[in-house]
Image (cartoon, rainbow, N blue to C red):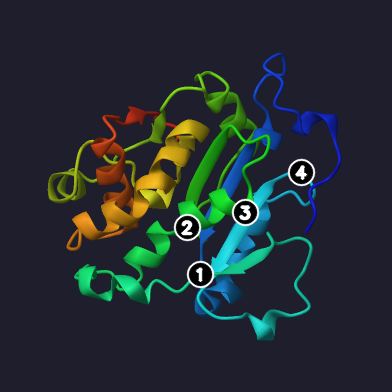
Amino acid sequence: MSRPKDPKFSDSPSIPTNLSHVVFGIAGSAKTWRNRRWYVETWWRPNITRGYIFMDIFPRKFLPWPPSSPPFRIYQDTSRYKNYDKHPIPQAIRMTHIILETFKAENKGVRWYVLADDDTIFFINNLADVLARYDHNKYVYIGMNSESHASNVYHSFNMAFGGAGYALSFPLAEALVNNLDICIKRYPTLYGSDHILQSCVADLGVSLTPEKGFHQ
């Protein structure tokens, strides 16, 4: 789906951050899409929101693809990492790879990348307002840890949990993409993609900026 030709897509510093500067990378699967598409479609705005829903296989049974859903992409083959894949969640590496695939597909006029699951719900105007408070020219990692103390103890208190979604500024996303290959190999046993990415972010010297509006 082509991006609308709209002056709001300009990345002029004089233009406040708005939805046109935000790109979503949504982790999904063909198996769950029948039920979860409705979650995404409650907040996705065709020709306004930017981004992709990632599928494990070509979603043939959902064709023709409705304009009410984000355009889909198929996860890239990550089998080259099989020797480094000791993660409890089988899809951890391919979900980690979403940031790279999204960055390569959408990198013009972008200030923020927001990663989420296919059952995450956003109030996107509120999200844009929150992101506008931060300097997108710096390395910024925004999200929230879990409401479950046990989950934070098991994983990390300094990790944005993926079920709530989290945001990466453009420069941080670019740095992550450039270091993602070695980072995936460095952390072969972490639980899920959000923990892997948090570790990659920490390797760049960046800590979580907590925002309580991100909750799961």
Q: Which mark is residue 98?
A: 2
Position of 209 relative to 42 (above/below): above
Crowd band around label 4 with a 10 angstrom C-alpha radius: few (<14), some (14–19), many (20+)? few
Earlier residue among tags 4 and 2: 4
Which callout, 1 or 3, points to the residue nearer the camera?
Answer: 3
The amino acid type found where label 3 is placed reads Ala
Task: Please report the residue visible at 67 percent of the width from the left and 86 percent of the height from the top.
Answer: 61
Question: Horizontal and vertical percent for residue 100?
Answer: 48, 53
| Amino acid identity at mark 2 | Ile
Res. 53 visible in picture: yes
Q: Left or right: 48 with respect to 159?
A: right
Q: Quadrant of residue 65?
A: bottom right
Q: Position of residue 155 (x, y in %)?
A: 18, 49
Q: Judge whether residue 146 can be spotted in this image.
A: no
Identity of the amino acid at label 4? Ile
Q: Please, what secondary structure does the residue beneath circle 3 have? A: helix
| Residue pointed to by mark 1 | 75
Element on which disc 2 rests: helix
Q: How far apart are marks 4 and 1 (CA)?
A: 23 Å
Classify residue 49 as left or right of residue 76: right
Q: Mark 3 points at which residue?
A: 105
Q: Are marks 3 and 2 in contact (CB under 8 Å)?
A: no
Quarter-wise, where is residue 91 in the image?
bottom left
Question: Of the residues shown, which amino acid type is indicated by label 1?
Answer: Tyr
Marks 1 and 3 sit apart, C-alpha to C-alpha, by: 13 Å
Sequence-wise first label, 1 or 3: 1
Whether tag 4 and tag 3 are in contact, CB under 8 A, the answer is: no
Nearer to the camera, 110 or 191: 110
Q: Are marks 4 and 1 in contact (CB under 8 Å)?
A: no
Residues tagged 1 and 2 counted as in contact (Cβ below 8 A): yes
Mark 4 highlights which residue?
Answer: 48
